[in-house]
Structures are given as structure tokens and as C-alpha cells.
Image (cartoon, rainbow, N blue to C red):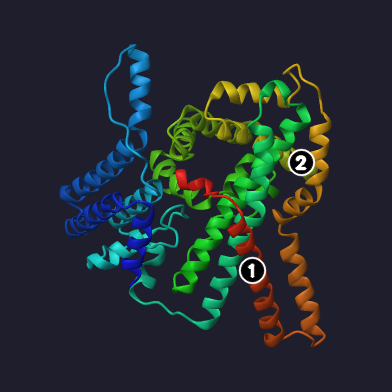
């Protein structure tokens, strides 16, 4: 039943490319069997290499063909014809998932799945299919075989799903509408303060958008008996670029660490090369455009500097200053992420840092800032664990006094979830189409 509705769900958005999804799953299923059957022999390694080639070829053809050919034509000053395909939804996620399966089977970290329909279920699960988190087979293999769907687990899943929906509809979409007023306007009329407000709102938008989707995926998974790992851990409270990437898109950073950085040698040999390769590919994974490559290398540079020079200094300075350092790095990085045209990105940065020959602020900035000040404060507050900690503390106090128990907790949570669902649905119905940002990756 899950397979049928997962494939129907994907076909609703990609009626043709569902065939590509099934093809990818089929190839890696049979290659996984070969890898395990011939373990320790050259045939096992050949099957693994075949899996890597097939998966990366699919990703390269459908996501990067236009980018590569455009750059080749530019370098050769030629016009080599090529076909550029529409990007299949979620291809970056499910190819990484099937690729991790083949590698884990080769390493002996998981057993090959011998029933095709169960492997297809792993690849096609609609909860996280189109925008992650990246789920590894070994983490849910036991639940594919036997799941326990409990009332408590289902209740948690509903709560988590509605939290994610609220993040997307109430917070991400609101922040995005304000950000667009500054980021999409002509640079000649953009002020320094307007640039900072615009990119700050985009930072809030992309966090609540992507973490909201991850919450929805984790919640849907729990409703059906699957436990997915967390993908975000309050990244905006980090105090260094290194710490930020331990908290942001955890499934992607851990994938590159386990399947690329460590096999290349990690910190043991050629550490600088390994780091730059990982961050070049991390940027490129997000999109077939040079701005994403620059964004990835931008973080790679700061992580390298922190390892070589800044780590000790950041640990010694007051936390507020190390946090301000991270916010400056992070907001600067989002400029490269937002503008596909690098020239626009650099021009925006000049305005941000007062080199664009524009005024510091204007009346329009003051109007938008005052109108959205309360939202900005609430959204910034919700990027921290303060509310969660306050609630846990209040609950402990009420339990000690005997005024809080399972019945009160159930009624309170049900009421809160119902209100949040109702408000989110009302906003969703009244809003224009606003897809998740990470669908395009």
C-alpha cells in the first residue's frame, strides 16, 4: 500500500520521471545482491563501481548536463549541441540514498535486501522522497521488515507534521515575501539597511522552509512506523562555520563525511584537498550553477581557517562575539546561495557592506522594518531552543506540584495542534503557490 501511494504521489508531480525512480531502484537492488553474493571478490567491487557510475550518470545527465555543456562551449568558444532535461524532483536525494545502500552493502554494514518490493519501498517512501532528509537503508532496514505503529508514535508524528507545516506556511512564506521586496528590487534603489533586512529574511525563510519540510517528513514517517534521524539542530545558534554544518542539513553533511571525506583520507592525509573537494561538491549538489560552487567553497574556506587558525580564538572569546562571527559568515553565504548570477551577488555584497554608493536607509525600509518587527523577533526567537527549554521547565514544575499529567498534556497538545493546523490551512488556502525551496535540488 505504501509503495502504491508513494509512486502515485511522485507521479502526481513527475508522471514521466517516476520511471527513472523505478529504474534507479531496480538497478541498485540487483547490484546490491551481486555485491553481497561475491563479497571479497573482484565481482563485488565491479558491481559497486557499476552502481556508482549509474547513479552519478543519472545525476549528471539530468541535473548537470546543461551546466557542463554550457561551460564547455564557453571555453571552446563553440556551439556543441546538447539536450537539457527538466530536473526530476528529488533526484539528488534518492540517488544519494541508493548509492549509500550499495556502499554500505559493500562495506558489510548492512545486508542486501532480497525482496524487490521492500527495496522499492525504501527508495520511494513519499515522506522524504522529494526533499529529504537523506535516509540510509541501514537506519530503517529493521522498520521495513517490521514496524510498530503505536498511538503514542502516531500522535508524535501528527504533532511533528503540523509543526513543520506551520514553519513553512506561517514563518517561511511570510519571511520570503518580505525578503523578495528587497532582494528582487533594483540595486540602484536598495539601501544598506534594506540589503541586510532582505538577506536576514531570506535566512529565516530557508531555515523554516527546509527544517519545516524535514519536520513534516519525520512526522509522516513516524505515523507509519518509521523513525528518521534529525536533519536540523538549531543551526543559527552555532558559534562557528564548523558548528553550523554540524547542525544544518545533517543528513547531507554526514553523507559527504562518511562516503567521501573519510575515504579520501579525512584529516590523516591531504586534509586540505579533501576538505575543498567535499565543499566544492557540496555546493554543486545544491544546483548546477557556479554560485552554488562559490557558496560551498566559501564555507570550505572558513572551516579550513577555523581548523588552522580561528578555532582557539573562537573558543576563548565571549560567546556573543563568536555567534556574531557566525551570523556574519552565514548571511554573507546566503547571498551567494540566493543569486544565481554571481555578478549580482557581488554587487549585492557591495551594497551590504556600504560600498555600493547608496544611502544607509530610507523611508521604505523603515516602513517594512516596523511592520515586520514583531514577526522578525518571534521568528528569530523560534530559531533557538529557548521555547522548548522553557516548556520542559514549566512542565517539570507543574508535574512536581501535581497539576500536570497525561490527560492534561494530551488535551493541551491536541488543542495546540488543532489550532496550528487550522491557522496553517487558512493561510495556505489564501496564499499563492509557494513551493518548498529544496524541491529544486
Between 331 and 110, the one lying in front of the other is 331
- Mark whose residue sits in front, 2 or 1: 1
Q: Measure the C-alpha gap from mark 2 to mark 1.
A: 47 Å
Determine if residue 124 is in view.
yes
Residue at the outermost top position: 77
Give the secondary structure at mark 1. helix
- Using residue 339 as the reference point, say whether residue 23 is left or right of it: left
Q: What residue do we see at 33% from left, 24% from top? A: 69
Residue 417 higher or lower than 379, as above or below: below
Q: What residue do we see at 35% from left, 67% from top? A: 5
Q: What residue do we see at 48% from left, 73% from top? A: 223
- Residue 269 horizontal/vertical position (percent): 44, 35
Q: What residue do we see at 27% from left, 51% from top? A: 24
Residue 200 higher or lower than 421, as above or below: above
- Using residue 297 as the reference point, say whether residue 349 is left or right of it: right
Q: Earlier in the sequence, mark 2 or mark 1?
A: 2
- Residue 398 horizontal/vertical position (percent): 80, 81
Give the secondary structure at mark 2. helix
Work out which quarter of the rendered image holds the C terminus and state it: top left
Question: Badge 2 is on which residue?
Answer: 316
Question: Badge 1 is on which residue?
Answer: 422
Q: Quadrant of residue 417?
A: bottom right
Amino acid at each position: 500500500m505504501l509503495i502504491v501511494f508513494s509512486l502515485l504521489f511522485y507521479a502526481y508531480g513527475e508522471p514521466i520521471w517516476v520511471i527513472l525512480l523505478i529504474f534507479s531502484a531496480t538497478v541498485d537492488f540487483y547490484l546490491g545482491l551481486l555485491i553481497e553474493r561475491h563479497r571479497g571478490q573482484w565481482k563485488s567491487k565491479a558491481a559497486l563501481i557499476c552502481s556508482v557510475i549509474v547513479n552519478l550518470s543519472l545525476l549528471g545527465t539530468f541535473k548537470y548536463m546543461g551546466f557542463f555543456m554550457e561551460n564547455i562551449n564557453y571555453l571552446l568558444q563553440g556551439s556543441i549541441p546538447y539536450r537539457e532535461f527538466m530536473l526530476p524532483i528529488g533526484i539528488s536525494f534518492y540517488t544519494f540514498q541508493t548509492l549509500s545502500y550499495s556502499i554500505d552493502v559493500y562495506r558489510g554494514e548492512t545486508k542486501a535486501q532480497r525482496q524487490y518490493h521492500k527495496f522499492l519501498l525504501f527508495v520511494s517512501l513519499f515522506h522524504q522522497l522529494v526533499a529529504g532528509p537523506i535516509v540510509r537503508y541501514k537506519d530503517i532496514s529493521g522498520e521495513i521488515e517490521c514496524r510498530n505503529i503505536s498511538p503514542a508514535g502516531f500522535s508524535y508524528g501528527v504533532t511533528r507534521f503540523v509543526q513543520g507545516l506551520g514553519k513553512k506556511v506561517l514563518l517561511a512564506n511570510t519571511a520570503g515575501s518580505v525578503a523578495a521586496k528587497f532582494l528582487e528590487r533594483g540595486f540602484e534603489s536598495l539601501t544598506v539597511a534594506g540589503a541586510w533586512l532582505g538577506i536576514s529574511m531570506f535566512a529565516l525563510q530557508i531555515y523554516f522552509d527546509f527544517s519545516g519540510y524535514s519536520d513534516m517528513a519525520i512526522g509522516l514517517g513516524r505515523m507509519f512506523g518509521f523513525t528518521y534521524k534529525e536533519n536540523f539542530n538549531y543551526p543559527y545558534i552555532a558559534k562557528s562555520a564548523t558548528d553550523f554544518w554540524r547542525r544544518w542539513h545533517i543528513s547531507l553533511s554526514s553523507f559527504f563525511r562518511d562516503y567521501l571525506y573519510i575515504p579520501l583520507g579525512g584529516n590523516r592525509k591531504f586534509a586540505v584537498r579533501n576538505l575543498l573537494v567535499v565543499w566544492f561538491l557540496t555546493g554543486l549538489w545544491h544546483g548546477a550553477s557556479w554560485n552554488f560552487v562559490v557558496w560551498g567553497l566559501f564555507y570550505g574556506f572558513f572551516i579550513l581557517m577555523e581548523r588552522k587558525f580561528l578555532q582557539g580564538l573562537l573558543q576563548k572569546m565571549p560567546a556573543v562575539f563568536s555567534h556574531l562571527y557566525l551570523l556574519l559568515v552565514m548571511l554573507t553565504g546566503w547571498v551567494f546561495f540566493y543569486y544565481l548570477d554571481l555578478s549580482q551577488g557581488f554587487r549585492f555584497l557591495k551594497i551590504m557592506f556600504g560600498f555600493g554608493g547608496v544611502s544607509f536607509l530610507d523611508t521604505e525600509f523603515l516602513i517594512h522594518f516596523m511592520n515586520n518587527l514583531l514577526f522578525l523577533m518571534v521568528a528569530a526567537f523560534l530559531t533557538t531552543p529557548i521555547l522548548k527549554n522553557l516548556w520542559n521547565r514549566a512542565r517539570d514544575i507543574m508535574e512536581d506540584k501535581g497539576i500536570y499529567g497525561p490527560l492534561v498534556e494530551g488535551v493541551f497538545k491536541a488543542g495546540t495542534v488543532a489550532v496550528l493546523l487550522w491557522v496553517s490551512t487558512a493561510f495556505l488556502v489564501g496564499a499563492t503557490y509557494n513551493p518548498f525551496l529544496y524541491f529544486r535540488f
